[in-house]
Structures are given as structure tokens and as C-alpha cells.
Amino acid sequence: MNPSDYLNILPEISEALSAGKPVVALESTIIAHGMPYPRNIQTALEVEEIVRKNGAIPATIAILDGKLCVGLDPAQLEMLGNSTDVWKVSIRDLPFVVSNKLKGATTVASTMRIADMAGIRIFVTGGIGGVHRGAETTMDISADLSEMSQTSVAVVSAGVKSILDIGLTLEYLETGGVPVVTYGQPDFPAFYSRSSGYKSPLQLNDPSAIAQMLRVKWELGLNGSVLIANPVPVSMEVPYEKMEGFIREALDEAARQNITGKRITPFLLRTIAEKTGGESLNANIALVKNNAELGAQIAVGFCL
Ligand code: PSU
Ligand code: MN
């Protein structure tokens, strides 16, 4: 078997790819483990619609029945978003979940890998995984970062959530040769907040300029991702200082309950959403939609 024998690409998507039309990959961990039902499904459908309105074809990626699925139908989305037995699949989980024909939601790392196999170059998410606070003792550094240094799929995110050590995450991306470009402002955004206290290494103000940079990077033979950071819309922002308190409480709670490894990110997301009484969830949904718009525009520019 070749890697491509494991792919199950919806006809609309494979036709678009062979015709050189814009396609945007979307992840499924955000649906299965990042947001509560039913807003997760509703958001996933709206995000696909936004990608279409902006001229690209959406390709939500997940693992079902031993296949790497590129593009899901509404029933499959519903199943992923409303089941309790869906695996969170990062790179190392891929062979186990595929060979045992389990249900799998893909993280940034595994979504990138599968998008690459399918030939999709632009991927939209909410936030990437990174270097966790305290990583100097836990060694908890997301496989998203190592993936970004090797796989040539650009990632549009709202920056990095401050459940992570943002400074160390930016350092790690530099070491991995991953350009970090913020759209439209000099500050690197912190997911719920437009500013993180860190300057963005790069700034570009127009989707076609971002598309051109991607083209040049890969034409130069420089493999790997580009992190495109898109600040949350002003009206939906939760200020950094306000989030910081909730994030510290969530981290303390995780330590008390001894939550580690792959469970930590979903645990923190859920706890923060509860603590902010839904305000963080509304911001999360708004920023993913905002990223879908930018990602589709970049994909359109990339295909010209
Ligand atoms: N950060 C967020 N929202 C998310 C995730 C991260 O702000 O939904 C998810 C993504 O799927 C990401 C994964 O790839 O968590 C990272 O998990 P880990 O830290 O276990 O690698
Ligand atoms: Mn981890």
C-alpha cells in the first residue's frame, strides 16, 4: 500500500485539487475536543460556509474506518462532535487509530500531515499547540511544533493561547525555521487577546502578500510551515489581563487533578470556557471564523 491508498478524499475536493483551485484544510480536534456540543458542529458548518463564500473549497480532516478522510459529510461531522469515544490524534497516534479503525479527530500536527499527503497547502485552525508553561521540567512541547518545521502546509491561527509559554513557543518556531507572520499589526496575538506582549517576528497586511511569501518559501526548497497569526476581531477580544487569571486557575486545577500529556490542552480549554461563562467560547468561535476568511483569501491568492 502507498500512503495515498489510505486517503479518502471527497470528489469535490480532489477535482478542485487537480484543477489547481483553492482548497483549505480544517482540523477536527477543535470540533471533538475543543468546543462543547452543539456549538462545535454549528461552528464547523459555518466555518466551511465562510471558506466557500471566500472562494475556496473546505476540507475538514478526520480519521474514520481506517481511512484518512479529507472532507466530511454532515453526518460524519455530527458523529465526531457528539460522541465520547473520539480519539485526539496527533502524529504518534495515527498508526494505532488507523489500524484499529477507531474514530479520530486530528490535531494541527496530524491535520497538516494528511493535508500534505492530499496536496493541500493552506490550513485554518483556532490556535496551535506549543511549548507549555513549565516545559523545562515536564518536557511538554506539542508535536504541532516539530511538524511545522518539516511539513509544507501553512497554518492560519489566532496566535498562541497563553495556556502556553508564548515566548518559548516563538523561540522554538525560530529554531525550527518556521516564519511567523502576523496579519495587519506589529504585535503577535494571544488567541483570545489581540496582543501577547511579544512583537511578531514579521508583519504582512494583505492576503496576496502572504500567499506570495508562501510560494517563494516553497520554491526555494525551504520545506516546513509558515505560522500566520490573525488577531481576534476587536469586538470579540477578551483582554489579556482578564484571561490571565482564569488561565492560572485552570493550570492550578490541572495540577491538582494531575492532568498531563494529551489531556492537558482539552482540559484547559474546557475549564477556561466554564470559568469565563462562555465569553471565551464566543471569542474562540469568532476567531476561527475570522481565520477561515483570511485562510480562504490566502488560498485564492496562492492559486493565482
Ligand atoms: N490550542 C487551542 N485550541 C485547540 C488546540 C490547541 O487553542 O483546539 C488543539 C489543536 O488541535 C492542537 C492540539 O493541535 O490542541 C494540541 O494538543 P497538544 O498540546 O496535546 O499537542
Ligand atoms: Mn503535550
Image: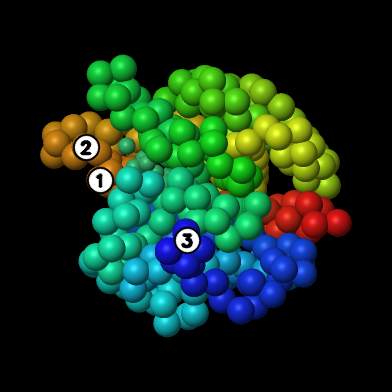
Q: Residues within 10 Å of mark 1 (few under 14, many from 20)?
A: few
- In the picture of the structure, the residue carrying the numbered disc 2 is 260
Q: Quadrant of residue 182?
A: top right
Cα–Cα span, label 2 and label 3: 35 Å
**Residue 181, x across and y down, in percent:** 68, 33
**Residue 226, x across and y down, in percent:** 64, 37
- State which quarter of the image contains the C terminus: bottom right
Amino acid of disc 2:
Thr
Q: Are marks 2 and 1 in contact (CB under 8 Å)?
A: yes
Q: Secondary structure at mark 2?
A: loop
- State which quarter of the image contains the N terminus: bottom left
Cα–Cα span, label 1 and label 3: 32 Å
Amino acid of disc 3:
Asn
Amino acid of disc 1:
Arg
Q: Residues within 10 Å of mark 2 (few under 14, many from 20)?
A: few
Q: Residues within 10 Å of mark 3 (few under 14, many from 20)?
A: few
129 shown above or below 10: above
- In the picture of the structure, the residue carrying the numbered disc 1 is 263
- In the picture of the structure, the residue carrying the numbered disc 3 is 2
Q: Residue at x 46, y 21 (%)?
A: 168
Q: Quadrant of residue 257?
A: top left
Does residue 193 appear anywhere in the picture?
Answer: no
- Closer to the camera, 25 or 224? 224
Q: Quadrant of ligand 1?
A: top left
**Residue 128, x across and y down, in percent:** 48, 42
Q: Residue at x 32, y 55 (%)?
A: 95
Say whether disc 1 or disc 3 marks the residue closer to the N-terminus: 3
Determine whether, in the image, residue 212 is placed left or right of residue 240. Answer: right
**Residue 271, x across and y down, in percent:** 29, 47
Q: Residue at x 65, y 77 (%)?
A: 12
Determine whether, in the image, residue 83 is placed left or right of residue 279. Answer: left
